[in-house]
Image (spheres, helix red, strand yellow):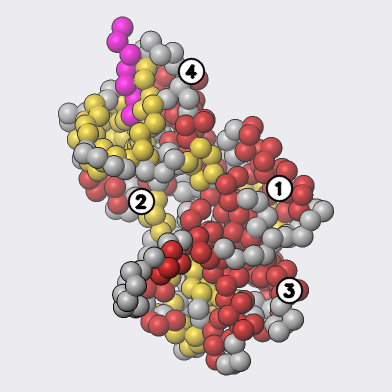
Amino acid sequence: MNPKRILVVGAGHVGLYAALRLSKKLSSREAEVIVVDPQPHMTYQPFLPEAAAGNISPRHSVVPLRRELRKCKVVAGTVTRIDHDRKTAIVQPISGPTREIQYDHVIVAPGSVSRTLPIPGLHEQGIGFKTIGEAIFLRNHVLDRLDVAAATTDPDIRRSALTFTFVGGGYAGIEALAEMEDMARDALRYYPELKPDDMRWVLVEATQRVLPEVDRDMGAYTVQQLLKRNMDIRLDTRLESCVDGVVKLSDGDSFRSDTIVWTAGVKPSPMLDATDFPRDDRRRVTCLPTLQIVDGDRVVEGAWSAGDCAAVPDLTKEPGNFCSPSAQHAVRQAARMADNIVNVIRGREPVNYKHKHAGSVASLGLHKGVAQVYGIKMTGWPAWFMHRTYHMSRIPSFNRKIRVVVDWSLAFFLKREVVALGQLHDPREEFAEASQPVGAARV
C-alpha cells in the first residue's frame, strides 16, 4: 500500500497538534505528513501578554516546528493556492521558485488575522497583538515611551507618550492592557521623574461589557478591578479616528496617544480566498461536526478544517450554533480531526466532534485574575494561579513547560526585566549610518 500524503496548511494550534498526533498514530508506511508554514514555530498565543510583560521569555512562548515534528516534513513557505479538484497546493517557499505539492488529504488551518475596520489613521498608527513579534514590539514601545516622557520637558509630549489606548474588550485586549499596565507600573520605580498618576491607560469597547465569554458579573468584576487601578474604561464607545495619533471617540472625547493597540476581534485568514473550498457568510470554511469540509450536503472528500478559520457546528448547543474561535476548541478539534483522518485511512468512519466549553481564565496582571470554569467562579490570586496552571499544561512539549515554569519561579526571587530593546526593530540603522561613503548626504 502506498502511503497517503497528508498536507497540513498552517502550523498554529490546529496544524501543530494535528500533525503531531498524526505522526504518532500513523506509521511511515501508512502516511507522510507535510506541514507548510512561513514561520519556523507555533506561537502559543495565550502567553503573548506574559511575554510582552516580561514574565516569561518570548522564546519560551513559541514551539519550534522542526524540534516537535521530527516525523513530519516541514516546508518553510506560504500556500498561495489550493486546487482541491486536482488535490494540489501551490507553495511559495521563503526563497526560490514556487512548487506544487500533491496530496491525498489536506488540513486547511491557516488560522485568523486581526479584523480591522476602515478607521482613519488605524493603518498608520495601530499595533496588533496576535504574533510574538507584535508582543515584543509593544513591550519595547511602552518602555520607550516611558523614556521619552522622562526625558522631555514638554507637558504635551509627556502626556501623549504616557497615554496608552487599547481597542477591544475581549480576552486579548483585557489581558494585554492589564499586563502592560502592571509592567509599566513596575518600571516606574526606576523613573523618579514620573509618577503612576502620570500614566493614562484607556480601554475602548464598542459593546456594553467586557469578556463576553464569561457571565456579566465576572465582566463587571473585571471592570471594577481595572477602575481601581485608575484605568479609563469606555464601554459602548467606538474608535472613530486616530490620524496622527489623535484619538477621537464616538462619545465625543479626543486626546493624543502614542500607543494604539487594536485587539477588536479576528477574521479567517485571507489565504482561504485562494482555495476552491465552500465558505459561509463570515468567510469561514464550512465543516461537518466530523471536521470534514462540506459543500451543501456533499462531503468534500479528503478535505478537513478546524480552528479559527472553520465553521464547526457546536453539538452542545441548539442547531445553528458554531464553536467559538478559541484555543480550547482548536486543540481539541485538532485531536479529533487527526483521529478521524486515521479512521478514514484505516477504513473506519469518522466521529463527530463534541465538546462543551469548559469556561475561561484570564490574567489581569501579576497575582490578579478572573476565571469561570465549569460554572465555578474565581477571582484574584486563585484565578491567576488557575490561569497559569491551565496554560502551562496546554503548551506543547515538556521542554517548553519546564522553561516557562523556570521563568515563573525566577520571577519570585528576581525583579522583572524592564529594559527596552528597541534596536531589535531596526538593527541595521546604526551600521548603515556608520558605513555611509564619505561625503554622502545624510537623510
Picture residue at 52% right of the left edge, 30% below the top:
68
Q: Earlier in the sequence, mark 3 or mark 1?
A: 3
Q: Please name which of the two marks, 3 or 4, marks the residue nearer to the observer.
A: 3
Per the image, the residue denoted by label 3 is 190
Q: Position of residue 30 (x, y in %)?
A: 38, 13
Which circle marks residue 25 in the picture? 4
The residues bearing labels 4 and 1 have C-alpha atoms spaced at a distance of 33 Å
Residue contact between numbered discs 3 and 1, judged by CB atoms under 8 Å: no
26 versus 156 height, above or below: above
The residues bearing labels 2 and 4 have C-alpha atoms spaced at a distance of 29 Å
161 versus 424 height, above or below: below
Q: Nearer the viewer, residue 68 or 103?
A: 68
Structural crowding at the residue carrying mark 3, measured as other residues with C-alpha within 10 Å and reported as few (<14), some (14–19) or many (≥20): few
* Residue type pointed to by label 2: Pro
97 versus 231 height, above or below: above
* Residue 334 located left or right of residue 152: left
Picture residue at 57% right of the left edge, 92% below the top:
154
Structural crowding at the residue carrying mark 2, measured as other residues with C-alpha within 10 Å and reported as few (<14), some (14–19) or many (≥20): many
Per the image, the residue denoted by label 2 is 268
Picture residue at 32% right of the left edge, 76% below the top:
439
The residues bearing labels 3 and 2 have C-alpha atoms spaced at a distance of 42 Å
Q: Please name which of the two marks, 2 or 1, marks the residue nearer to the observer.
A: 1
Which circle marks residue 407 in the picture? 1
Task: Report the magenta residues as a range.
Answer: 1-7
For this orientation, the residue located farthest to the right is: 413
The residues bearing labels 2 and 1 have C-alpha atoms spaced at a distance of 33 Å
Numbered disc 4: secondary structure: helix
For residue 17: magenta? Answer: no
* Residue type pointed to by label 3: Tyr
Q: Position of residue 201 (x, y in %)?
A: 60, 76
Q: Position of residue 164 (x, y in %)?
A: 56, 76
